Amino acid sequence: MKELIIGGARSGKSLLAEKRAKESGLKVVYLATAQALDGEMARRVAHHRERRPAEWGCVEEHLHLAAKLREIAAPDTCILIDCLTLWLSNLLFAGEAAKQAEAGEAIDCPLFHQQIGDLVAALPELPGRIILVSNEVGWGIVPMHPVSRLFADEQGRLNQRVAAVCDQVTLVAAGLPLTLKSPPA
């Protein structure tokens, strides 16, 4: 089973993902995409780490998510990926995409497009349970800055592509889950 859990910042999506992972009855591996590049992000990472059960495994992958999933996915394992939003940001700044957007150029970044394509292709093939957390960023105003517009556009596209290959999609708002897509009965 593959599930995408989306919502706004501080909506409760990570808490729901953690709850579903605990309830899966499987061994849980938390796959973190964040990079603690400043004090504020380090505090966020520490907060997430403190509330996870000690018996959960944890791996970090900032760019090559599909390859890492292929490496660690197993029938007896639930992998909780938190989150696709930070992973997308990592991809934008690791390659040339952010620089190209800043310069007003068309985006031609093989790393960016290949990694997203690899993830979408890998998800249906992976054994075990996969829970992906992602932000819904498209409900606000259109950002003024070119890099912010690129990010909002690509986050929306990524969420759509991942939702299409997931069995279940859940939107979280104010801590309340709303099922958008569920497996056929």
Image: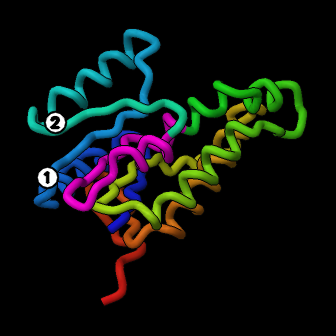
Disc tally is: 2
User: Which residue is more in the foreground, 141 or 29?
Assistant: 29
- Residue sitting at 44 percent across and 11 percent down? 38
The numbered dot on residue 22 is: 1
Image quarter of residue 161 = bottom right
Amino acid under disc 2: Arg
Relative to 100, say whether 31 is above or below.
Answer: below
- Residue sitting at 43 percent across and 47 percent down? 8
- Disc 1 residue crowd, few under 14, some 14–19, many 20+, Cα 10 Å: some
- Disc 2 residue crowd, few under 14, some 14–19, many 20+, Cα 10 Å: some
Please tell me which of labels 2 and 1 falls first in the chain. Answer: 1
User: Which residue is more in the foreground, 172 or 63?
Assistant: 63
Task: Give the residue at the far bottom of this rendering.
Answer: 185
Amino acid under disc 1: Lys
User: Which residue is more in the foreground, 20 or 112?
Assistant: 112
Q: Is residue 107 magenta-colored?
A: no
Task: Give the residue at the far top of this rendering.
Answer: 39
Residue 34 place in picture, x, y as percent: 42, 28
Relative to 53, say whether 134 is above or below.
Answer: below
The numbered dot on residue 52 is: 2
Alpha-carbon span between mark 2 and mark 1: 10 Å
Q: Is residue 170 shown left or right of residue 119?
A: left
Residue 122 place in picture, x, y as percent: 51, 58
Q: Which residues are magenta?
A: 65-87
Image quarter of residue 56 = top left
Relative to 76, say whether 93 is above or below.
Answer: above
Q: Is residue 75 magenta-colored?
A: yes
